[in-house]
Image (cartoon, grey):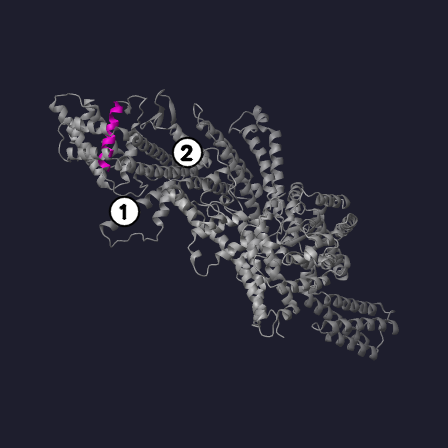
Amino acid sequence: MLDFLAENNLCGQAILRIVSCGNAIIAELLRLSEFIPAVFRLKDRADQQKYGDIIFDFSYFKGPELWESKLEAKPELQDLDEEFRENNIEIVTRFYLAFQSVHKYIVDLNRYLDDLNEGIYIQQTLESVLLNEDGKQLLCEALYLYGVMLLVIDQKIEGEVRERMLVSYYRYSAARSSADSNMDDICKLLRSTGYSSQPGAKRPPNYPESYFQRVPINESFISMVIGRLRSDDIYNQVSAYPLPEHRSTALANQAAMLYVILYFDPSILHTHQAKMREIVDKYFPDNWVISIYMGITVNLADAWEPYKAAKTALNNTLDPSNVREQASRYATVSERVHAQVLKFLKEGYLREEMVLDNIPKLLNCLRDCNVAIRWLMLHTADSACDPNNKRLRQIKDQILTDSRYNPKILFQLLLDAAQFEFILKEMFKQMLSEKQAKWEHYKKEGSERMTELADVFSGVKPLTRVEKNENLQAWFREIAKQILSLNYDDSTAAGRKTVQLIQALEEVQEFHQLESNLQVCQFLADTRKFLHQMIRTINIKEEVLITMQIVGDLSFAWQLIDSFTSIMQESIRVNPSMVTKLRATFLKLASALDLPLLRINQANSPDLLSVSQYYSGELVSYVRKVLQIIPESMFTSLLKIIKLQTHDIIEVPTRLDKEKLRDYAQLGPRYEVAKLTHAISIFTEGILMMKTTLVGIIKVDPKQLLEDGIRKELVKRVAFALHRGLIFNPRAKPSELMPKLKELGATMDGFHRSFEYIQDYVNIYALKIWQEEVSRIINYNVEQECNNFLRTKIQDWQSMYQSTHIPIPKFTPVDESVTFIGRLCREILRITDPKMTCHIDQLNTWYDMKTHQEVTSSRLFSEIQTTLGTFGLNGLDRLLCFMIVKELQNFLSMFQKIILRDRTVQDTLKTLMNAVPLKSIVANSNKIYFSAIAKTQKIWTAYLEAIMKVGQMQILRQQIANELNYSCRFDSKHLAAALENLNKALLADIEAHYQDPSLPYPKEDNTLLYEITAYLEAAGIHNPLNKIYITTKRLPYFPIVNFLFLIAQLPKLQYNKNLGMVCRKPADPVDWPPLVLGLLTLLKQFHSRYTEQFLALIGQFIRSTVEQCTSQKIPEMPADVVGALLFLEDYVRYTKLPRRVAEAHVPNFIFDEFRTVL
């Protein structure tokens, strides 16, 4: 009959594919369970209020139209719903596909069973497959994996969350309407069961059997599978555990399968007492806490509580006397084997001959170790004991007392056993690889010795006093021939023959009185030794390695091992070289990967890579977590060094008096620094001793681990310092901004200096790490802050700055800002608010409008540069850009509301436009202009606020660009020069292309312009005033409204010879620079035609008013005209345009003369 798993056996391949798929689905569910978006849990009040109306559970399906109509009634809800869809559709789809694959899995399994029953697979029936060894394993696994999937889903993804995700997918996805969509079936299978994985939560009635029966499965198949599991040792594990007391461990995997599959036929658990007794006696006579899949543990005393037959059967096992017996037995065993293992691990004890002679003894020791570790770890685990259940608590307390349980001792046993197992495996692997070569070598040596002896007895070789003896000569030649004829491939015959040869050599020594000649004796003894070695070598079998692999399985501790993390870390802290022993433990834990990967590998499934990557990644994360204690301890010492270096040790001047030498020597503090530095280098030495290791499929390089660990700790501490250092009290007078920045600057400098100091002692590039990580922290925080302004938010798992190995911590917001960069930005905006302060452009300084005290100046930005570096300033600049965009968008919607939807304002504007035809001089201008202003008075307050806000942010952006450019020219003048030249060259090329389109121009897909912009902005080589922030449509009346707005503000300002335009009354505050820059930025967003019209209207206003003054013989130039002229002058200065732009609308003699008149 064909091999069941052969490529061309369709029946075997079909079920193998199903099982392989099952293992992959479970890995995907476990992977996804770490990425559940928090909003679907609706845990906190804020989420409930914001999203409660757009996230539904299955009650939605009772009347979808009703819910949707509620949404459509409120535009803001629709907007939120759309935003929520954009942000979450990707992850929700991924979850839906995982849920769909669970349903598809059981449908495929049912179809396979139907095909078997209908005889689709020739000569194969359910019975014949169950008789085949691979067949019965796969069928049992297929059903068991389905049960595990359902349990994993319920444990990791709560019922309510699943319902909300499925409804969201149903509402947002287009795929649901397709004909082959089985949304209804998936919803029926995965609707909430009422189960909660929270500790102390009550178990729902008939759980999990009612959940397992949501998709019906062939009953005869279930009962046959249970029958097989009850009676057979389907994995032939007992051969690896010959001792009867190890039987329950040998059958542990099978027991876990049986536990899950029994829920498909709960009647056995409820009423079949005989069957349950048989199951308990075979699988659970001495254990009641089991691991069902990759470390998911279950306590049968709790799980079988509702089932009468199961509970009764288990009572024998849970009897206090039995519990005591097992606990004390394992206590004794663990003490005994630990002593043995420590003896074996002594340097030089495990030699090749010793190992080959004592294989059974060593394997028995390994078995005892692993069985004891398994029993003690499972039965003392916190996860397996519900603290609210009195009976479970009593059982656990009894175990802890009787087994004299000490987690440190158990962990030490695990460490030593793993080390012993690792050494033994490595020795065996080496012996296996050299087996044939050694065997041939011994054979050659033995036969050569015999040939030499034959020559001795020929009388030719001069060996003292050996007479010629032709019989012995012929006999030895024959033996030499026999030794050479031994065949390596036929090990049994060769072994038998070797034993006979050894006997023959012993006999020849006795019968022929050869003892008298020492040299002959020596030759014979050597040959016997070689023959013995051949027997030993031929007995090195791969089966020993396989047994070790089976016995050393640690998959049950995949999750439990976490409870030992603190012990591991403590022992590393005390003795860093401990890491080498831990390496063996991690490798032992990696053997757990064989369980889910075996079938995927057999099926040649493409999932192999992703599944092995998931589990290997989990394990590597755990290794990182344990070893993180090394960087943590390093940084604790580093903080002491920082303190000593910044506060205690005085800088030695370049010249000093001899008498003062002792004061500057400061031997005490310097000795302290040296001691701490030594401690740090010892820690790093510990981790570097752990050679490069392959964990699953991920290569773990200890140097990389150390660097990542140091980065992680640095990120944690710097992020916390930034978060804590930049929290401001908005009521503080004066502002806390500068003192806080100085304080934070000192902290960051301390980190930087000590980090640089330590680099040589731990062999890392500290400056590189410092710059990379600080820039990552700041960029990530800027990104999170800017998320507030974006519809499609950048989630953590999409962010290029966030990392799983070196995560940037998130802190709960303390005000409207999400991060420290937002708080810094809003504090700067608060203290430079144009309503309270007045910005003097020539001095780059802000003064308080009422007290005329300096509030802040451009020094603020040098301070930020010192504290947060270029990244901080650049991030602040980016955030200001987003804020400007928001303000401009708000301005546009306000323009729509208060101007384009207000009939009276529109009539006023129409009248004014008719009264002031461009190019002409307006007669009776004052009356016309000021009546229009009076009629539109109510709109100017909001208008002024929006314009000033934009102007204020543009001033800040200019200051930031100045600071960036200044420091760039100082710190990296070559970069600054290169960027400026490249920029000029590019612009020249682009201009040339527009003159002559045959010349080259960057194509659509060329990212050059986009990339160079980022560099230019970081180096401050840009003008914020030229930036287009938003795309705009045509707006009617736009130039005239802005013109009216400007002349409406002019009466509030007055000209001062020293300071330019300043506010008349602090009670009615207007600040000139933000006003000019705000208007300029606003006009820049629209077509230049609007700016032309706006400037023409100002020119017309100046000409008309001057004309009126001249005709009325008023000698002074009116203040409003001075203001309008100054506006034009500033406009030309800020935009760097030629003066003729303004002179096109105002005669140049007015421009030249107006300052002399003042």
Q: Looking at the picture, how far across and down is residue 646, in whole percent?
A: 54, 30
> How many circles with numbers are drawn on the protein?
2
Q: Splitting the image into 4 quarters, where does residue 446 fall?
A: bottom right
Q: Looking at the picture, how far across and down is residue 895, in whole percent?
A: 29, 36
The kind of residue tagged 2 is Cys
Q: Secondary structure at mark 2?
A: helix
Counting residues from the start of the chain, the first of labels 2 and 1 encountered is 2
The kind of residue tagged 1 is Ala
Determine which of the numbered discs, if any, sits on residue 1133 in the image: none
Closest to the observer, 625 or 423:
625
Asked if residue 1017 can be seen in this view, the reply is: yes
Tell me which residue sits at (32%, 53%) in the image. 1004
Closest to the observer, 557 or 98:
98
- The residue mark sitting in front, 2 or 1, is 2
Asked if residue 426 can be seen in this view, the reply is: no
Would you call the spot at circle 1 few (<14 residues within 10 Å), some (14-19), or many (20 or more)? few
Closest to the observer, 372 or 489:
372
Query: To which residue does mark 2 refer?
Result: 825
What range of the chain is rendered magenta?
A: 1038-1056
Judge from the rendering whether residue 695 lies leftward or rightward of residue 525; answer left or right. left
Q: Looking at the picture, how far across and down is residue 681, in whole percent?
A: 61, 41
**Residue 717 magenta-drawn?**
no
Q: What's the CA distance linking mark 2 and mark 1?
A: 36 Å
Determine which of the numbered discs, if any, sits on residue 988 in the image: 1
Question: Considering only vertical position in the picture, is 464 above or below 683?
Answer: below
Q: Looking at the picture, how far across and down is residue 497, in whole percent?
A: 77, 73
Closest to the observer, 1032 or 1145:
1032
